[in-house]
Image (cartoon, rainbow, N blue to C red):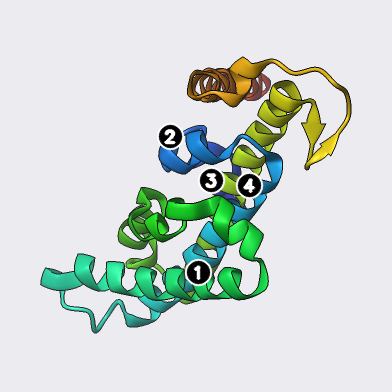
């Protein structure tokens, strides 16, 4: 497996931040009432991941080890501020929907975790790809969850009403936890089943 292929499969599958590592649970639970919310938050996190990973990778040799975490947070906060200002200016409706969870990207454990475990130890291109695929893994996961909860909770998909029927449970906090749990269980079941089949084919 090539290096870039490994980075991609880690971010999307093997180390999927939402369904495998169970990181960023606050926005996952709070914002997945609609698929568009998932896309908005996911793309915002992806942008911050890529930019912060690149800058941290570029500066890794000159950032003193003793203050690396505060510096990482400062870098992340800078890009979060850029996202906030851009959304407030150009997509105010999404800015209002994401609310307090937008500035909380600064302390999102996905971003800080990748900065510490990957970007600070790897080249710029690898770090950019890691941010891209970790962000896509997060975006796809919460968008699919939002799609399911929106469809069952309000009978709509991407804000378009399909039928006049809804199950209020899926719009509630309990529904968020239930949906998240089901997604994690199904994801890990499929991954484990695929891994067993791959090992059998190799005769392991």
Secondary structure of the residue carrying tag 3 is: helix
Q: Secondary structure at mark 1?
A: helix
Q: Which mark is residue 146?
A: none
Query: How many C-alpha atoms fall within 10 Å of the one at disc 4: few (<14), some, or many (≥20)?
Result: many
Q: What residue is pinned by disc 2?
A: 22
Tell me the quadrant of the picture where the C terminus can be found.
top right
Give the spatial CA distance, label 2 vs label 3. Answer: 14 Å
Q: Is residue 160 above or below residue 71?
A: above
Residue under pointer 1: 84
3 or 167: nearer the viewer: 167
Residue denoted by label 3: 10
Residue 87 placement, left or right of 23: right
One can see residue 18 in this view: no
Vertical placement of residue 62 versus 204, above or below: below
- State how far apart marks 3 and 1 are (Cα): 28 Å
Q: On the picture, is 145 further left or further right than 27? A: right
Question: Looking at this rendering, what residue extends furthest in the left direction?
Answer: 66
Of badges 4 and 3, nearer the viewer stands 4
Residue under the point 52% across and 75% down:
85
Q: Earlier in the sequence, mark 1 or mark 4?
A: 4
Residue 184 point in image, percent of width and height: 53, 24
């Amino acid at each position: 497996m090539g290096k870039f292929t490994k980075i991609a499969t880690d971010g999307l599958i093997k180390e999927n931040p939402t369904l495998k590592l169970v990181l960023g649970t606050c926005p996952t639970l709070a914002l997945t009432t609609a698929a568009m919310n998932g896309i908005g938050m996911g793309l915002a996190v992806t942008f911050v991941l890529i930019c912060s990973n690149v800058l941290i990778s570029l500066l890794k040799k000159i950032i003193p080890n003793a203050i690396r975490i505060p510096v990482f947070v400062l870098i992340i906060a800078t890009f979060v501020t850029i996202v906030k200002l851009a959304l407030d200016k150009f997509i105010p409706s999404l800015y209002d929907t994401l609310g307090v969870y937008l500035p909380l990207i600064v302390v999102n454990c996905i971003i800080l975790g990748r900065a510490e475990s990957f970007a600070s130890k790897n080249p710029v291109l690898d770090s950019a790809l890691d941010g891209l695929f970790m962000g896509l893994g997060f975006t796809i996961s919460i968008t699919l969850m939002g799609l399911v909860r929106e469809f069952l909770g309000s009978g709509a998909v991407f804000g378009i009403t399909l039928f006049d029927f809804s199950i209020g449970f899926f719009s509630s906090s309990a529904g968020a936890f239930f949906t998240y749990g089901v997604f994690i269980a199904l994801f890990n079941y499929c991954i484990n089943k695929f891994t067993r089949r791959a090992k059998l084919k190799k005769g392991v």
